[in-house]
Image (spheres, rainbow, N blue to C red):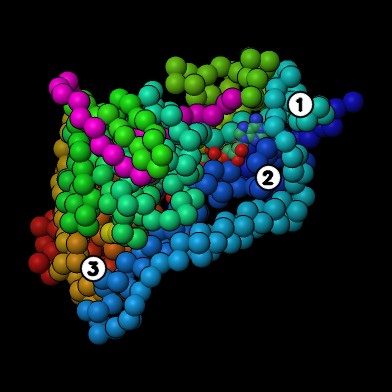
Amino acid sequence: MADSFDLIVIGSGPGGYVCAIRAAQLGMKVACVEKRATLGGTCLNIGCIPSKALLQSSENFHELVHGFKDHGINAGDISIDVARMQARKGEVVTANTKGIEFLFKKNKITWLKGEAKFTGPNEIDVGGTAYTAKSIVIATGSDSVPLKGVAVDEKHIVTSTGALELDKVPAHIVVIGAGVIGLELGSVWRRLGAEVTVIEFLDRITPGLDNEISKTFQQILTKQGFKFKLGHKVTGATVAGEQVTLTVEPAKGGDAETITADIVLLAIGRYAYTAGLNLEAAGVAVDERGRVKTDAHYATNVPGVYAIGDVIAGPMLAHKAEEEGTALAETLAGQHGHVNYGAIPSVVYTWPEVAAVGQTEEELKAAGIAYKIGKFPFMANGRARAMGALEGFAKILADKETDKVLGVHIIGPDAGTLIAECTTAMEFGASAEDIARTCHAHPTLSEVVKEAALAVDGRPIHI
Ligand code: FAD
Ligand code: NAI
C-alpha cells in the first residue's frame, strides 16, 4: 500500500517549504518532494540568496574602489578574487539550504528525495514508490524563458543560473531584457569592471515599475556605466571560440546590426514550471501561459490538489510564494488563510535599491482613480547626506478624496527596508496623514518616507 500523508508538497522553494512547515505546525503529517540535491528551491539555490551574496560582495568592492577615498580611507592596491567571492556565495547558499533541512527535521517533515509525478488525482510517484495524501500542493516554481535563436549553454550564453557562476569578470556582458534579473546581475559584473550593454524590447526599462521611477533608475544606471539599447530585439546568436555575436534589430523594424560580447545573459522573464509532473494523469488544468489554474483559495480543478507560488498567476516573488504557502496551510487546517495582493512589496537590489508597493501612477490613471502625489528627495535627508547616498526619492500616491495610501515607490539607499513601513501602513489601510504624523527617528533614511507623506498635503518641512 502507498505511504500516506495528510499533505504532500511538491517543491521545496519558499512556497513549498513554508507551506510544509506551517502545515506541520498545525498538526498535519507532511512530506515535501524535492528533486534538487538541496532544499530551498530557486530562491535559496540559484535565485534570491546567491544573487544577493554577489550583490553584497560587488557592492563592497565598488565602495572600496570608488567610495572610501571620499571618507579619507585609502586602501592601497585593490583587487577582486572572483574564486573567493564565488566560494563565499556557496557558503551563504549552503548555510541557508541546510537551515531548511534543519527546519524540516525540527517540524518532522519527511523529505521525499526525487522527482514527483502524478499517477492519479491524489497519488504521486517518486522514484518508483507511490505516495498518497489528503491534499497535494504543487509548488514547482518557474524557469527562465528561452529565446528563439539564442541557445543557452550556461557558459557563453547564460541564464541567471550561469551568470551567478562566472569564474572571471567578463570584459563585455550583453544582457537581453532590462528587467530585475538583468539589472541586478548586470550590476554585479558592472561593479567588478565589466562593460554592460542591456538590450530591451520595450522603450523603457523595468516595465512593471512606476514610469517616473524607471526613468530615474535608467539615468542612475547610465551614470554607473550601463549602456541601454531600448526598443531592440535579439534575433540570433552565434558562439565562436570565446565570443558571442548577437544579431540585433529595432523592435519596430529596421536594419539589423551585430554586437559582440564574451558573455550574454538571457533574462526576458520566467515561466511556470510543470515539466515532468504529469499533470494530465491528475487532470489538473493550466491556463494559456502554462500556469496551474487555481481559485482564490489555491484549489485547482481537481479536488484535493492545490498550487502556490511561481507556478500560479501573480508576481514571481519569494515572499508572495511564502504568503500563499502559509495561507493555504491554514485554510487546509480549517483556518482563514488570506493574502492581500494589494500590499505585496517588490524590491530591486541594485545600488541604489528600488522598492514599490501598491499601485503605480500609470495604473491609477488607467483605473480612473483620482490621486495626490507626495515626493521627497534623499538629497534633502541628513542621514543620506552623511552616507553620501543622495540619489533618488520617495513618492507616495494617496487617494485624492480619502488620503488613503494607494502606492509607494522609492528609489534610493535602503529602499527595500523603507518599503516595509509603507507595506505595513497599506495593510492597516493608512492615510498619508497617518504616516506623516508618525514620529520617525532622526537622522534616519525613513524620514524621507515621512516627508513624502507630508508632501502629499503640500507641507514637507525640509525642502
Ligand atoms: P521555486 O523556488 O522555483 O521552487 C520550486 C522547487 O520545486 C525547485 O526546487 C524544483 O527543483 C522543485 N521541483 C520542480 N518540479 C518538481 C518535481 N516534479 N518534483 C520534485 N521537485 C520539483 N524573488 C524575490 O522575492 N526576491 C529576490 O531577491 C529574488 N531574486 C531572484 C533572483 C534570481 C536570479 C531568480 C531566478 C529569481 C529571484 N526571485 C526573487 C524569484 C524567486 O526565486 C521565486 O519567486 C521563488 O523562488 C518562487 O518560489 P516557489 O516556491 O514558487 O518555487
Ligand atoms: P522581468 O519580467 O523582470 O524582465 C524581463 C524584461 O525582458 C522585460 O523588461 C521585458 O520587456 C524584456 N523582454 C522580453 N522579451 C524580450 C526580448 N525578446 N528581447 C528583449 N527584451 C525582452 O524578467 P526577469 O528579469 O527575467 O526576472 C524574472 C522574474 O524573476 C521577475 O519578474 C521577478 O519576479 C523575479 N525576480 C525577482 C527579483 C527581486 O525581487 N529582486 C530578482 C530577480 C528575479
Element type at mark 3: loop
Q: Which residue lies at the image location 50% right of the left edge and 62% below the top edge?
A: 83
Q: Position of residue 131 (x, y in %)?
A: 79, 29
Q: Which residue lies at the image location 36% right of the left edge and 44% below the top edge?
A: 262
Q: Is residue 161 left or right of residue 369?
A: right
Extreme residue in the front direction = 241
Disc 1 target residue: 125
Q: Is mark 1 within 8 Å of ligand 1?
A: no
Residues drawn in magenta: 252-275
Disc 3 target residue: 389
User: Which label's residue is closer to the chain start, 3 or 1?
Assistant: 1
The answer to which quarter of the image holds residue 269 is top left
* Residue 37, numbered label: 2
Element type at mark 2: loop
Q: Is residue 185 left or right of residue 328?
A: left
How packed mark 1 is, by other alpha carbons closer than 10 Å (few <14, some 14-19, many 20 or more), is some
Q: Is residue 235 positioned above or below 339 on the image? A: above
Q: Position of residue 85 (x, y in %)?
A: 48, 63
Question: Please, what is the three-letter code of the amino acid marked with disc 2?
Answer: Ala
Instruction: Judge depth for marks 2 and 3 and give the one in front.
Output: 2
Instruction: Judge depth for marks 2 and 1 and give the one in front.
Output: 2
Question: Please, what is the three-letter code of the amino acid marked with disc 1?
Answer: Asp
User: Which label's residue is closer to the chain start, 2 or 1?
Assistant: 2
Q: Inspect this view and state whether residue 353 appears.
A: no
Q: Is residue 421 left or right of residue 334?
A: left
Q: Which residue lies at the image location 17% right of the left edge and 46% below the top edge?
A: 215
As measured in the structure, the alpha-carbon distance from the residue carrying label 2 to the one carrying label 1 is 18 Å
Magenta-drawn stretch contains 186: no
User: Which label's residue is closer to the chain start, 2 or 3?
Assistant: 2
Q: Position of residue 355 (x, y in %)?
A: 32, 52
